[in-house]
Amino acid sequence: MSLFRVFVDGALFYHPKLSQLAITQAQIKEDAENIDSLTISAPFNHPYLERIKPMASTIVCKKDDQVVFEGRALDDGSDFYNTHTWTCESALAYLKDTLQPPFDYKGTLKGLLEFFIENHNANVEEKKRFIIGNVTVTDSNDYIHYSNSEHSVTLDAIKEKLIKTHGGYLSIRYTDKGRVLDYLSDFKTYSVQSVEFGKNLLDVKITQDHTERVTALIPYGAKIKSTDEEGNETETDERVGIAEVNGGVPYVYDEKAVKEIGWIWTSEVWEDVNLAGVLLKKANTRLSELVKGIISMELTIVDESDTGADIGDIHARQYVVCKSPPHGIDGRYLCVSKTTDYLNPASNTITIGASGVKLTTISVKQNQNISDLENSILGQTSKIEQINGKIDDINASKMYRTELICDGTSIFKNKGQQSILKCKVYSWDKDITDTIDAACFWWHRKSDNEESDADWDANHVGMKQIYITTEDVLDNASFYCVVNMKEE
Protein backbone atom coordinates (compact mmCIF):
# COMPACT_ATOMS: atom_id res chain seq x y z
CA MET A 1 0.00 0.00 0.00
CA SER A 2 1.41 3.40 -0.96
CA LEU A 3 2.23 5.93 1.74
CA PHE A 4 1.00 9.54 1.48
CA ARG A 5 2.73 12.15 3.64
CA VAL A 6 2.79 15.94 3.98
CA PHE A 7 5.86 18.01 4.88
CA VAL A 8 6.07 21.67 5.88
CA ASP A 9 9.48 23.26 5.33
CA GLY A 10 11.00 19.78 5.41
CA ALA A 11 9.34 18.71 8.68
CA LEU A 12 6.73 15.93 8.78
CA PHE A 13 3.22 17.37 9.14
CA TYR A 14 1.05 14.34 8.30
CA HIS A 15 1.63 10.60 8.45
CA PRO A 16 -1.29 8.12 8.21
CA LYS A 17 0.16 5.93 10.97
CA LEU A 18 0.68 8.71 13.49
CA SER A 19 -2.63 9.68 15.08
CA GLN A 20 -1.17 12.82 16.65
CA LEU A 21 -0.36 14.09 13.15
CA ALA A 22 -3.86 13.52 11.77
CA ILE A 23 -5.42 15.73 9.12
CA THR A 24 -9.01 15.85 7.89
CA GLN A 25 -8.51 16.78 4.23
CA ALA A 26 -5.80 16.50 1.60
CA GLN A 27 -7.10 17.17 -1.89
CA ILE A 28 -4.82 17.93 -4.83
CA LYS A 29 -6.06 19.24 -8.15
CA GLU A 30 -3.66 18.82 -11.05
CA ASP A 31 -4.34 21.03 -14.07
CA ALA A 32 -2.33 20.70 -17.28
CA GLU A 33 -3.31 24.19 -18.42
CA ASN A 34 -3.06 26.08 -15.11
CA ILE A 35 -1.46 26.04 -11.68
CA ASP A 36 -1.95 22.91 -9.55
CA SER A 37 -3.59 23.42 -6.16
CA LEU A 38 -3.82 21.72 -2.77
CA THR A 39 -6.46 22.01 -0.05
CA ILE A 40 -5.34 20.71 3.32
CA SER A 41 -7.18 20.75 6.66
CA ALA A 42 -6.05 19.85 10.18
CA PRO A 43 -7.93 19.68 13.52
CA PHE A 44 -7.44 22.28 16.24
CA ASN A 45 -5.23 19.96 18.30
CA HIS A 46 -2.64 19.32 15.59
CA PRO A 47 0.71 20.10 17.23
CA TYR A 48 2.21 21.90 14.23
CA LEU A 49 -0.54 24.26 13.08
CA GLU A 50 1.72 27.27 13.53
CA ARG A 51 4.36 25.88 11.22
CA ILE A 52 2.38 26.72 8.08
CA LYS A 53 3.14 30.34 7.23
CA PRO A 54 1.06 31.56 4.23
CA MET A 55 3.24 32.72 1.30
CA ALA A 56 6.38 31.64 3.17
CA SER A 57 6.28 27.93 4.01
CA THR A 58 7.04 25.29 1.40
CA ILE A 59 4.38 22.54 1.40
CA VAL A 60 5.44 19.20 -0.09
CA CYS A 61 3.19 16.16 -0.54
CA LYS A 62 4.73 12.79 -1.30
CA LYS A 63 3.22 9.48 -2.30
CA ASP A 64 5.95 7.06 -1.31
CA ASP A 65 9.07 8.84 -2.62
CA GLN A 66 7.34 10.67 -5.47
CA VAL A 67 6.58 14.38 -5.07
CA VAL A 68 2.93 14.86 -6.04
CA PHE A 69 2.74 18.51 -4.97
CA GLU A 70 5.12 21.29 -4.04
CA GLY A 71 4.08 24.85 -3.41
CA ARG A 72 2.99 27.38 -0.83
CA ALA A 73 -0.07 28.15 1.28
CA LEU A 74 -2.10 31.19 0.22
CA ASP A 75 -4.38 31.55 3.21
CA ASP A 76 -5.40 30.07 6.53
CA GLY A 77 -9.02 29.77 7.66
CA SER A 78 -10.91 27.94 10.39
CA ASP A 79 -14.48 26.72 10.79
CA PHE A 80 -16.96 26.35 13.68
CA TYR A 81 -14.97 23.41 15.06
CA ASN A 82 -11.69 25.35 14.76
CA THR A 83 -10.49 23.06 11.99
CA HIS A 84 -7.81 24.92 10.05
CA THR A 85 -7.83 24.84 6.25
CA TRP A 86 -5.16 26.09 3.87
CA THR A 87 -5.49 26.65 0.13
CA CYS A 88 -2.13 26.15 -1.57
CA GLU A 89 -0.76 26.76 -5.07
CA SER A 90 2.00 24.82 -6.80
CA ALA A 91 5.54 26.00 -7.52
CA LEU A 92 4.50 27.21 -10.98
CA ALA A 93 2.91 30.15 -9.16
CA TYR A 94 6.39 31.44 -8.31
CA LEU A 95 6.40 32.86 -11.84
CA LYS A 96 3.76 35.32 -10.65
CA ASP A 97 6.23 36.89 -8.20
CA THR A 98 8.46 38.65 -10.72
CA LEU A 99 8.12 41.25 -13.45
CA GLN A 100 9.65 41.24 -16.91
CA PRO A 101 11.11 44.64 -17.84
CA PRO A 102 10.27 46.24 -21.21
CA PHE A 103 11.96 44.27 -23.96
CA ASP A 104 12.43 43.95 -27.72
CA TYR A 105 13.32 40.33 -28.45
CA LYS A 106 14.42 38.77 -31.74
CA GLY A 107 15.50 35.14 -31.88
CA THR A 108 14.34 31.59 -31.25
CA LEU A 109 11.25 30.59 -29.33
CA LYS A 110 13.32 28.69 -26.74
CA GLY A 111 15.55 31.73 -26.39
CA LEU A 112 12.59 33.90 -25.36
CA LEU A 113 11.61 31.43 -22.64
CA GLU A 114 15.21 31.37 -21.43
CA PHE A 115 15.19 35.19 -21.42
CA PHE A 116 12.05 35.25 -19.23
CA ILE A 117 13.33 32.62 -16.77
CA GLU A 118 16.77 34.23 -16.51
CA ASN A 119 15.13 37.52 -15.50
CA HIS A 120 12.87 35.67 -13.06
CA ASN A 121 15.72 33.73 -11.42
CA ALA A 122 17.74 36.91 -10.94
CA ASN A 123 15.00 38.46 -8.82
CA VAL A 124 13.89 35.64 -6.49
CA GLU A 125 15.41 33.46 -3.79
CA GLU A 126 16.84 30.03 -4.57
CA LYS A 127 13.70 28.00 -3.78
CA LYS A 128 11.72 29.89 -6.43
CA ARG A 129 14.18 29.43 -9.30
CA PHE A 130 13.78 27.17 -12.33
CA ILE A 131 16.03 25.27 -14.71
CA ILE A 132 14.91 25.22 -18.35
CA GLY A 133 14.30 21.62 -19.42
CA ASN A 134 12.70 20.25 -22.56
CA VAL A 135 11.25 22.73 -25.05
CA THR A 136 9.34 20.87 -27.78
CA VAL A 137 7.14 23.75 -28.95
CA THR A 138 8.58 25.09 -32.20
CA ASP A 139 8.15 27.96 -34.59
CA SER A 140 8.00 27.21 -38.33
CA ASN A 141 10.72 29.76 -39.04
CA ASP A 142 12.61 29.23 -35.77
CA TYR A 143 12.54 33.00 -35.43
CA ILE A 144 10.21 35.28 -33.49
CA HIS A 145 10.10 39.00 -32.80
CA TYR A 146 8.20 40.23 -29.75
CA SER A 147 8.35 43.41 -27.74
CA ASN A 148 6.67 44.99 -24.75
CA SER A 149 6.92 48.61 -23.65
CA GLU A 150 5.69 47.95 -20.11
CA HIS A 151 6.55 45.70 -17.19
CA SER A 152 4.60 42.42 -17.18
CA VAL A 153 4.23 39.52 -14.72
CA THR A 154 6.53 36.68 -15.81
CA LEU A 155 3.79 34.04 -16.02
CA ASP A 156 1.55 36.43 -17.97
CA ALA A 157 4.39 37.24 -20.36
CA ILE A 158 4.98 33.52 -21.04
CA LYS A 159 1.29 32.93 -21.66
CA GLU A 160 0.88 36.01 -23.88
CA LYS A 161 4.04 35.74 -25.98
CA LEU A 162 4.47 31.96 -26.15
CA ILE A 163 1.46 29.83 -25.16
CA LYS A 164 -1.17 32.09 -26.74
CA THR A 165 0.68 32.29 -30.07
CA HIS A 166 2.34 28.85 -30.28
CA GLY A 167 0.28 26.67 -27.92
CA GLY A 168 1.80 24.11 -25.60
CA TYR A 169 1.91 23.44 -21.86
CA LEU A 170 4.19 24.35 -18.95
CA SER A 171 5.17 21.39 -16.78
CA ILE A 172 7.41 21.09 -13.71
CA ARG A 173 9.70 18.19 -12.87
CA TYR A 174 11.41 17.79 -9.50
CA THR A 175 14.98 16.49 -9.86
CA ASP A 176 18.14 16.25 -7.78
CA LYS A 177 19.49 19.27 -9.67
CA GLY A 178 16.47 21.42 -8.92
CA ARG A 179 13.07 22.39 -10.22
CA VAL A 180 12.93 21.86 -14.01
CA LEU A 181 10.47 23.77 -16.21
CA ASP A 182 9.46 22.08 -19.48
CA TYR A 183 7.57 23.77 -22.30
CA LEU A 184 5.89 20.97 -24.24
CA SER A 185 3.83 20.90 -27.42
CA ASP A 186 2.23 17.68 -26.18
CA PHE A 187 2.69 15.17 -23.40
CA LYS A 188 4.35 11.83 -24.12
CA THR A 189 3.50 10.03 -20.87
CA TYR A 190 0.94 7.25 -21.00
CA SER A 191 -0.85 5.85 -17.96
CA VAL A 192 -0.55 2.10 -17.51
CA GLN A 193 -4.05 2.18 -16.06
CA SER A 194 -7.16 2.36 -18.18
CA VAL A 195 -10.59 3.72 -17.32
CA GLU A 196 -13.38 1.36 -18.37
CA PHE A 197 -17.15 1.28 -18.10
CA GLY A 198 -18.20 -1.46 -15.70
CA LYS A 199 -14.72 -1.66 -14.16
CA ASN A 200 -13.41 1.50 -12.50
CA LEU A 201 -15.60 4.20 -14.08
CA LEU A 202 -18.16 5.37 -11.53
CA ASP A 203 -19.75 8.40 -13.19
CA VAL A 204 -19.63 10.46 -16.38
CA LYS A 205 -20.55 14.13 -16.68
CA ILE A 206 -20.65 15.62 -20.15
CA THR A 207 -21.15 19.38 -20.33
CA GLN A 208 -21.93 21.51 -23.34
CA ASP A 209 -21.43 25.27 -23.64
CA HIS A 210 -23.88 26.70 -26.17
CA THR A 211 -22.28 30.17 -26.03
CA GLU A 212 -19.39 28.79 -28.09
CA ARG A 213 -21.49 27.34 -30.90
CA VAL A 214 -20.50 28.14 -34.48
CA THR A 215 -22.60 27.74 -37.61
CA ALA A 216 -20.17 28.76 -40.40
CA LEU A 217 -16.49 27.92 -40.85
CA ILE A 218 -13.86 29.36 -43.20
CA PRO A 219 -11.09 26.77 -43.50
CA TYR A 220 -7.50 27.45 -44.51
CA GLY A 221 -4.88 24.92 -45.46
CA ALA A 222 -1.11 25.11 -45.83
CA LYS A 223 0.59 28.13 -47.37
CA ILE A 224 0.81 27.88 -51.15
CA LYS A 225 4.33 27.58 -52.59
CA SER A 226 5.44 29.18 -55.86
CA THR A 227 8.38 28.34 -58.12
CA ASP A 228 10.37 30.99 -59.99
CA GLU A 229 12.02 30.66 -63.40
CA GLU A 230 15.14 29.18 -61.85
CA GLY A 231 13.18 26.48 -60.08
CA ASN A 232 13.49 27.95 -56.60
CA GLU A 233 10.48 27.24 -54.39
CA THR A 234 9.22 29.93 -52.04
CA GLU A 235 6.31 30.07 -49.64
CA THR A 236 3.64 32.71 -50.26
CA ASP A 237 1.23 34.30 -47.80
CA GLU A 238 -1.75 32.76 -49.62
CA ARG A 239 -3.25 29.56 -48.23
CA VAL A 240 -5.10 26.60 -49.72
CA GLY A 241 -8.87 27.17 -49.69
CA ILE A 242 -12.00 25.21 -50.63
CA ALA A 243 -13.72 27.53 -53.13
CA GLU A 244 -12.60 25.53 -56.17
CA VAL A 245 -14.24 22.33 -54.85
CA ASN A 246 -17.16 23.97 -53.05
CA GLY A 247 -19.04 25.75 -55.83
CA GLY A 248 -16.93 28.87 -55.57
CA VAL A 249 -17.83 29.36 -51.87
CA PRO A 250 -14.84 29.62 -49.46
CA TYR A 251 -16.75 28.45 -46.40
CA VAL A 252 -18.99 25.68 -45.09
CA TYR A 253 -22.08 26.14 -42.94
CA ASP A 254 -24.76 24.15 -41.19
CA GLU A 255 -28.14 25.09 -42.63
CA LYS A 256 -30.15 23.71 -39.72
CA ALA A 257 -28.01 25.50 -37.15
CA VAL A 258 -28.18 28.77 -39.08
CA LYS A 259 -31.98 28.60 -39.02
CA GLU A 260 -31.87 27.87 -35.30
CA ILE A 261 -29.37 30.45 -33.99
CA GLY A 262 -28.28 32.47 -37.05
CA TRP A 263 -24.90 33.04 -38.67
CA ILE A 264 -21.97 32.69 -36.26
CA TRP A 265 -18.58 32.67 -37.98
CA THR A 266 -15.12 31.37 -37.25
CA SER A 267 -12.02 30.27 -39.19
CA GLU A 268 -9.40 27.60 -38.64
CA VAL A 269 -6.07 26.65 -40.21
CA TRP A 270 -4.84 23.15 -41.12
CA GLU A 271 -1.12 23.68 -41.68
CA ASP A 272 -0.57 20.17 -43.06
CA VAL A 273 -3.38 20.12 -45.66
CA ASN A 274 -2.33 20.90 -49.23
CA LEU A 275 -5.36 19.63 -51.20
CA ALA A 276 -8.66 21.52 -51.41
CA GLY A 277 -10.71 18.32 -51.40
CA VAL A 278 -9.10 17.06 -48.22
CA LEU A 279 -9.54 20.49 -46.62
CA LEU A 280 -13.26 20.49 -47.48
CA LYS A 281 -13.73 17.10 -45.87
CA LYS A 282 -11.92 18.18 -42.70
CA ALA A 283 -13.90 21.42 -42.56
CA ASN A 284 -17.24 19.61 -42.73
CA THR A 285 -16.17 17.17 -40.02
CA ARG A 286 -14.95 20.01 -37.84
CA LEU A 287 -18.14 22.01 -38.32
CA SER A 288 -20.23 19.07 -37.13
CA GLU A 289 -18.55 19.52 -33.73
CA LEU A 290 -18.51 23.31 -33.71
CA VAL A 291 -22.27 23.56 -34.13
CA LYS A 292 -22.68 21.69 -30.83
CA GLY A 293 -20.48 24.04 -28.79
CA ILE A 294 -17.80 23.21 -26.25
CA ILE A 295 -17.92 19.77 -24.75
CA SER A 296 -15.91 18.55 -21.78
CA MET A 297 -16.13 15.22 -19.99
CA GLU A 298 -15.51 14.66 -16.29
CA LEU A 299 -15.09 11.06 -15.19
CA THR A 300 -15.39 9.88 -11.58
CA ILE A 301 -13.01 6.94 -11.28
CA VAL A 302 -11.43 4.46 -8.94
CA ASP A 303 -7.67 4.97 -9.21
CA GLU A 304 -6.45 1.39 -8.85
CA SER A 305 -3.20 2.55 -7.27
CA ASP A 306 -5.24 3.79 -4.29
CA THR A 307 -6.64 0.31 -3.68
CA GLY A 308 -3.22 -1.15 -2.99
CA ALA A 309 -2.64 -2.48 -6.51
CA ASP A 310 0.97 -2.34 -7.67
CA ILE A 311 0.28 0.05 -10.53
CA GLY A 312 1.16 3.66 -11.26
CA ASP A 313 -1.22 6.54 -10.55
CA ILE A 314 -3.26 8.33 -13.15
CA HIS A 315 -2.12 11.95 -13.34
CA ALA A 316 -2.99 15.05 -15.30
CA ARG A 317 -0.58 15.54 -18.22
CA GLN A 318 -0.85 11.85 -19.13
CA TYR A 319 -2.74 10.03 -21.85
CA VAL A 320 -5.27 7.54 -20.51
CA VAL A 321 -7.19 4.85 -22.35
CA CYS A 322 -10.89 5.46 -21.60
CA LYS A 323 -13.70 3.21 -22.76
CA SER A 324 -17.39 3.78 -22.13
CA PRO A 325 -19.43 2.73 -25.18
CA PRO A 326 -22.76 4.14 -23.88
CA HIS A 327 -21.18 7.60 -23.76
CA GLY A 328 -19.27 7.42 -27.05
CA ILE A 329 -15.92 7.36 -25.25
CA ASP A 330 -13.36 5.00 -26.78
CA GLY A 331 -9.75 5.97 -27.23
CA ARG A 332 -6.62 7.38 -25.63
CA TYR A 333 -7.36 10.81 -24.18
CA LEU A 334 -5.31 13.50 -22.57
CA CYS A 335 -6.06 13.76 -18.86
CA VAL A 336 -6.20 17.53 -18.60
CA SER A 337 -7.02 17.64 -14.90
CA LYS A 338 -7.33 15.29 -11.96
CA THR A 339 -8.71 15.86 -8.49
CA THR A 340 -7.24 13.43 -5.97
CA ASP A 341 -8.62 13.16 -2.45
CA TYR A 342 -5.94 11.25 -0.56
CA LEU A 343 -8.20 10.66 2.44
CA ASN A 344 -11.26 9.69 0.39
CA PRO A 345 -10.13 8.12 -2.92
CA ALA A 346 -13.72 7.29 -3.91
CA SER A 347 -14.25 10.92 -4.87
CA ASN A 348 -11.34 11.09 -7.32
CA THR A 349 -12.18 12.57 -10.72
CA ILE A 350 -10.38 13.18 -13.99
CA THR A 351 -11.31 15.46 -16.87
CA ILE A 352 -10.47 14.25 -20.35
CA GLY A 353 -10.16 16.98 -22.91
CA ALA A 354 -9.76 20.56 -21.77
CA SER A 355 -12.82 22.57 -20.89
CA GLY A 356 -12.96 25.15 -23.64
CA VAL A 357 -11.48 22.82 -26.26
CA LYS A 358 -13.61 20.97 -28.79
CA LEU A 359 -13.22 17.21 -28.93
CA THR A 360 -11.95 17.15 -32.48
CA THR A 361 -9.31 19.70 -31.62
CA ILE A 362 -8.22 17.43 -28.81
CA SER A 363 -7.81 14.54 -31.21
CA VAL A 364 -5.43 16.63 -33.32
CA LYS A 365 -3.36 17.44 -30.21
CA GLN A 366 -3.19 13.78 -29.27
CA ASN A 367 -1.31 12.69 -32.41
CA GLN A 368 -4.39 10.88 -33.70
CA ASN A 369 -4.32 8.50 -30.71
CA ILE A 370 -7.99 9.14 -30.05
CA SER A 371 -10.39 7.25 -32.26
CA ASP A 372 -12.38 9.97 -34.00
CA LEU A 373 -15.55 10.60 -32.03
CA GLU A 374 -17.22 12.17 -35.02
CA ASN A 375 -16.75 8.90 -36.92
CA SER A 376 -18.05 6.86 -33.99
CA ILE A 377 -21.14 8.96 -33.40
CA LEU A 378 -21.96 10.82 -36.61
CA GLY A 379 -22.50 9.61 -40.13
CA GLN A 380 -21.37 5.99 -39.83
CA THR A 381 -24.33 3.70 -39.34
CA SER A 382 -22.20 0.59 -39.08
CA LYS A 383 -20.25 1.95 -36.14
CA ILE A 384 -23.40 3.17 -34.44
CA GLU A 385 -24.91 -0.30 -34.82
CA GLN A 386 -21.71 -1.81 -33.45
CA ILE A 387 -21.85 0.47 -30.40
CA ASN A 388 -25.55 -0.26 -29.94
CA GLY A 389 -24.75 -3.96 -30.07
CA LYS A 390 -22.18 -3.55 -27.32
CA ILE A 391 -24.68 -1.59 -25.25
CA ASP A 392 -27.22 -4.38 -25.71
CA ASP A 393 -24.63 -6.88 -24.51
CA ILE A 394 -23.94 -4.77 -21.44
CA ASN A 395 -27.65 -4.27 -20.74
CA ALA A 396 -28.17 -8.01 -21.02
CA SER A 397 -25.59 -8.60 -18.31
CA LYS A 398 -26.07 -7.69 -14.68
CA MET A 399 -23.98 -4.61 -13.92
CA TYR A 400 -23.72 -4.06 -10.19
CA ARG A 401 -22.06 -1.37 -8.11
CA THR A 402 -21.91 -0.65 -4.39
CA GLU A 403 -22.04 2.59 -2.46
CA LEU A 404 -20.81 3.01 1.11
CA ILE A 405 -22.78 5.52 3.21
CA CYS A 406 -21.46 6.92 6.49
CA ASP A 407 -24.17 8.11 8.86
CA GLY A 408 -22.15 10.17 11.33
CA THR A 409 -18.57 11.39 11.41
CA SER A 410 -16.11 9.78 9.02
CA ILE A 411 -13.01 10.77 11.01
CA PHE A 412 -12.99 10.15 14.77
CA LYS A 413 -11.22 12.86 16.78
CA ASN A 414 -12.39 12.01 20.28
CA LYS A 415 -13.20 8.88 22.27
CA GLY A 416 -16.81 7.75 22.44
CA GLN A 417 -17.68 8.74 18.86
CA GLN A 418 -19.57 6.34 16.63
CA SER A 419 -20.99 6.09 13.14
CA ILE A 420 -23.23 3.80 11.12
CA LEU A 421 -21.84 2.38 7.87
CA LYS A 422 -24.39 1.23 5.32
CA CYS A 423 -23.69 -0.66 2.12
CA LYS A 424 -26.06 0.04 -0.79
CA VAL A 425 -26.12 -2.16 -3.89
CA TYR A 426 -27.26 -0.85 -7.28
CA SER A 427 -28.06 -2.59 -10.52
CA TRP A 428 -27.19 0.26 -12.86
CA ASP A 429 -28.97 3.12 -11.03
CA LYS A 430 -31.65 1.02 -9.29
CA ASP A 431 -31.23 0.39 -5.56
CA ILE A 432 -31.59 -3.40 -5.08
CA THR A 433 -30.20 -3.60 -1.53
CA ASP A 434 -33.50 -4.80 -0.05
CA THR A 435 -33.69 -7.69 -2.52
CA ILE A 436 -30.32 -9.15 -1.48
CA ASP A 437 -29.92 -11.59 1.39
CA ALA A 438 -28.02 -10.07 4.32
CA ALA A 439 -25.73 -13.11 4.31
CA CYS A 440 -24.14 -11.76 1.12
CA PHE A 441 -22.66 -8.76 2.94
CA TRP A 442 -19.13 -9.28 4.29
CA TRP A 443 -17.50 -6.33 6.07
CA HIS A 444 -13.74 -5.92 6.33
CA ARG A 445 -11.40 -3.76 8.35
CA LYS A 446 -7.84 -2.87 7.31
CA SER A 447 -5.44 -1.66 9.99
CA ASP A 448 -1.87 -2.38 11.08
CA ASN A 449 -2.94 -5.55 12.96
CA GLU A 450 -3.84 -8.29 10.45
CA GLU A 451 -4.70 -10.86 13.13
CA SER A 452 -7.08 -8.47 14.88
CA ASP A 453 -8.59 -7.51 11.50
CA ALA A 454 -9.34 -11.16 10.75
CA ASP A 455 -11.20 -11.51 14.06
CA TRP A 456 -13.10 -8.30 13.40
CA ASP A 457 -14.06 -9.47 9.89
CA ALA A 458 -15.38 -12.78 11.23
CA ASN A 459 -17.76 -10.91 13.54
CA HIS A 460 -19.15 -8.66 10.82
CA VAL A 461 -20.68 -11.03 8.28
CA GLY A 462 -24.34 -10.99 7.24
CA MET A 463 -25.07 -7.34 8.00
CA LYS A 464 -26.21 -4.62 5.61
CA GLN A 465 -25.13 -1.96 8.07
CA ILE A 466 -22.69 -1.88 10.98
CA TYR A 467 -21.83 0.39 13.91
CA ILE A 468 -18.28 1.73 14.10
CA THR A 469 -16.88 3.17 17.33
CA THR A 470 -13.47 4.48 18.34
CA GLU A 471 -12.73 1.00 19.73
CA ASP A 472 -13.04 -0.42 16.18
CA VAL A 473 -10.68 2.14 14.71
CA LEU A 474 -7.75 1.61 17.11
CA ASP A 475 -4.99 3.97 15.86
CA ASN A 476 -5.87 4.05 12.18
CA ALA A 477 -8.23 1.86 10.17
CA SER A 478 -10.36 1.79 7.05
CA PHE A 479 -13.51 -0.21 6.35
CA TYR A 480 -15.16 -1.67 3.26
CA CYS A 481 -17.86 -4.17 2.36
CA VAL A 482 -17.77 -7.03 -0.13
CA VAL A 483 -21.12 -8.22 -1.48
CA ASN A 484 -21.10 -11.78 -2.80
CA MET A 485 -23.89 -11.74 -5.37
CA LYS A 486 -25.62 -15.05 -6.03
CA GLU A 487 -26.36 -15.31 -9.73
CA GLU A 488 -29.54 -17.13 -10.63
Image (tube, grey):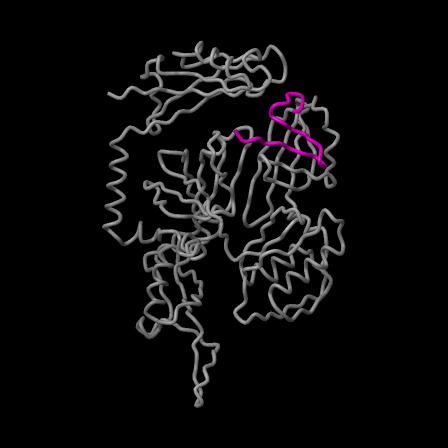
Q: Is residue 239 left or right of residue 393?
A: right
Q: Position of residue 244 (x, y in %)?
A: 33, 75
Quadrant hosting residue 267: bottom left
Q: Position of residue 194 (x, y in %)?
A: 41, 40
Q: Which residues are magenta?
A: 1-21
Near-viewer residue (371 or 310): 310
Quadrant hosting residue 442: top left
Q: Position of residue 345 (x, y in %)?
A: 51, 31
Q: Residue at 40% of width from left, 14% of height from top? A: 464
Is residue 113 on the magenta stretch?
no
Near-viewer residue (280 or 323): 323
Quarter in which the C terminus is drawn:
top left
Q: Is residue 298 left or right of residue 4?
A: left
Quadrant hosting residue 259: bottom left
Q: Is residue 339 left or right of residue 6?
A: left
Is residue 9 on the magenta stretch?
yes
Asked if 250 appears above or below 365 in the picture, the reply is below
